Image (tube, rainbow, N blue to C red):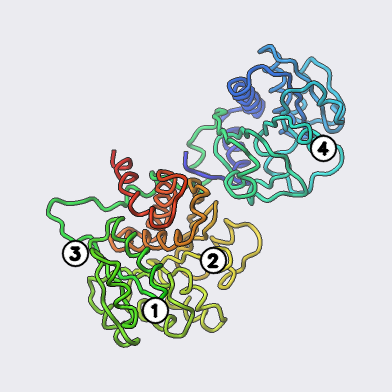
Amino acid sequence: MTEVLSVKQMYGADRAAMKLGIAGETLMEAAGREVAEAILEQFGALPTTILCGPGNNGGDGFVIARHLKKAGAKVRVALLGDKSKLRGDAAIMAKRWRGRVRSMDDGVLDDAGLVVDALFGAGLSRKITGAARHVLVAAERRGLPIVAVDIPSGVQGDSGQVMGHAPQAVMTVTFFRPKSGHLLYPGRDLCGEIWVVDIGIPDDVLTTIRPQTFVNDPALWLPSWPPLSAVGHKYSRGHAVVLSGGAGKTGAARLAAGAALRVGAGLVTVASPKGALAENAAHLTAVMIDPWRDGKEFRRLLSDPRRNAVCLGPGAGVNKHLRDNVLAALNLGKAVVLDADAITAFATATARKGLFQKLHENCILTPHQGEFGRLFDDHGDKLERTRSAAAECGAVVLLKGPDTVIAAPDGRAVINTNAPPELATAGSGDVLAGFCTGLLAQGVPAFEAAAAACWLHGAAASQFGPGLTAEDLAPTLPAVLAELRA
């Protein structure tokens, strides 16, 4: 289940299921039952307070109450608003609850061992205020574990942003497929452990919804992974070139080059300024070195058609020479990865326009948030920002972070979920750029290369664990690749 839905698409899935003859009442009953079963599995039959909102999320809450009570839990239900004003399936489920319905105040939390947040779902579009906010804040102050139904109330389902206030859940149970707000920060953190449960919506409805956002998973890009051949050789696996910075600034390029080689490029060359030649030579063995003095020599270096993928930016310095070298690589039709300084070097309006005219579908840009804002609009939803940026520049954009988003110009996007906090270390981004370049060199399409590189980056970091430095990532990769092969 790699698909990620927007709030609107989830509503569409519900409607499509109903057109197939599955009643909304049936879906709500299944949703509440699945949440209750998840709670019992994780926490047992604790004394539970269920906070119900005035819509369908609240209807789920009444179903949960019924099933928890049947399992032997002491259950207290509080409703935001008047029970008589409930409509549709929520009204039906409220009538099936035979217990007392309390008003929304913090007295409902007395003696509770668990709180179920069934106030508002992912479609909320305004800040939480009044009694709902008061009780949620009180539950957190008392240290009560909170289980969220669909998404913690106050987290916007598409962006993951908090509208006023949202509680910290220990577990969130959502339905059919996750929404992007479950995977983007801060929503991802506030959800706690995320359970996606089946409530009877057929997978076939996805053919009408046609989602274009996915959880980054090997199933998406392994079909594009180049198989090794018994008759293959180093040139058949591609030749990656990494542009080095000047003397004293060469480490980033070497990290990228080593990563490109480790991920499978047949050959890797560091294009070294002549003044940094000795510095690079002292550290490199399997990675080759080719010196250059000026733009003409750099273009000569790239003129070999077998040198098919180029990484520019790590440690390169922000200057006109870098801009010229980027444009030279693009003019020669190379697969290109632009990282770090190679992004900042095009921050002016004129330079940006010239870059966007040259970028093509076999290019990957790997900015962090600050670099992204130098080229693109950096306001609003991270997923939509990245998707818009890719469409604007005509290349794959990989916007780094704990919730890295990768988008293609055709609208496809993935959200990466496997990055551990150990990746917040100097040089890790250079390794990621190298993984991207090595995969491009082997002929992996840019979108799949970026997604695979990002997943491998996170998996290698997790495999290594505490104490990680950037130098550890590439040497740890073979264990990850072995697991994928198995």
How far is the residue under mark 2 from the one under mark 1?
Answer: 31 Å
Q: Residues within 10 Å of mark 4 (few under 14, many from 20)?
A: many
Percent position of residue 103, x then y: 87, 28
How far is the residue under mark 2 from the one under mark 4?
Answer: 37 Å
Q: Which mark is residue 235?
A: 3
Q: Tell me which residue sits at (30%, 56%) in the image.
A: 262
The residue identified by callout 2 is: 389
Q: Which of the marked residues, 2 or 4, is nearer the chain's N terminus?
A: 4
Q: Which of the marked residues, 2 or 1, is nearer the chain's N terminus?
A: 1
Tally of marks: 4
Say if residue 89 shows up in the picture.
no
Q: Which of the marked residues, 3 or 4, is nearer the chain's N terminus?
A: 4
CB contact under 8 Å: marks 3 and 4: no
Percent position of residue 311, x then y: 37, 69
In what element is the residue under mark 1?
Answer: loop
CB contact under 8 Å: marks 4 and 1: no
